[in-house]
Image: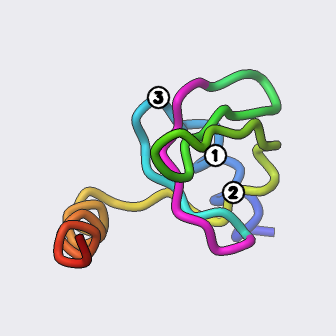
């Protein structure tokens, strides 16, 4: 129950610009937030609407920096 509470709190604080990882393992950037849904960008030109229940976790600032460095190294 504590984990569910912590997850609900994390999801309730998601804001535009946050980087998330979906339960399906996709990295995404939040474009807009509604009551039960998010609009996210998976890649350049690929934007989708998803339910908040599909969020696995929100990346911390440190993880965002590491993620960005990995993406730029691959290009």
The quadrant of the picture occupied by the C terminus is: bottom left
Relative image position of residue 42 (x, y in whole percent): 56, 52
Which mark is drawn over residue 16?
3
Crowd tier of the residue under label 2, counting other residues whose Cα lies within 10 Å: few below 14, some 14–19, many 20 or above: many
The residue located at (52%, 38%) in the rendering is 30
Is residue 15 or residue 4 the one in the foreground? Answer: 15
Badge 2 is on which residue? 55
**CA separation, marks 3 and 2?**
14 Å
Q: Which residues are magenta?
A: 24-32
Tell me: residue 46, above or below residue 55. above
Q: State which tag comes first along the sequence, 1 or 3.
A: 1
Q: Is residue 12 left or right of residue 34?
A: left
Q: State which tag comes first along the sequence, 1 or 2.
A: 1
The quadrant of the picture occupied by the N terminus is: bottom right
Q: State which tag comes first along the sequence, 3 or 2.
A: 3
Mark 1–mark 2 CB contact (< 8 Å) = yes
- Describe the colour scheme in one phrase: rainbow
Q: Is residue 73 left or right of residue 43?
A: left
Q: Quadrant of residue 50?
A: top right
1 or 2: mark nearer the eye: 2
Q: How many marks?
A: 3
**CA separation, marks 1 and 2?**
7 Å
1 or 3: mark nearer the eye: 3
The residue located at (73%, 69%) in the rendering is 23
């Amino acid at each position: 129950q504590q984990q569910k509470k912590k997850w609900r709190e994390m999801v309730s604080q998601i804001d535009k610009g946050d980087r998330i990882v979906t339960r399906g393992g996709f990295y995404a950037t939040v474009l807009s937030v509604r009551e039960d849904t998010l609009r996210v960008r998976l890649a350049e030109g690929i934007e989708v609407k998803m339910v908040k229940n599909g969020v696995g976790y929100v990346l911390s600032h440190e993880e965002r920096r590491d993620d960005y460095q990995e993406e730029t190294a691959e290009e």
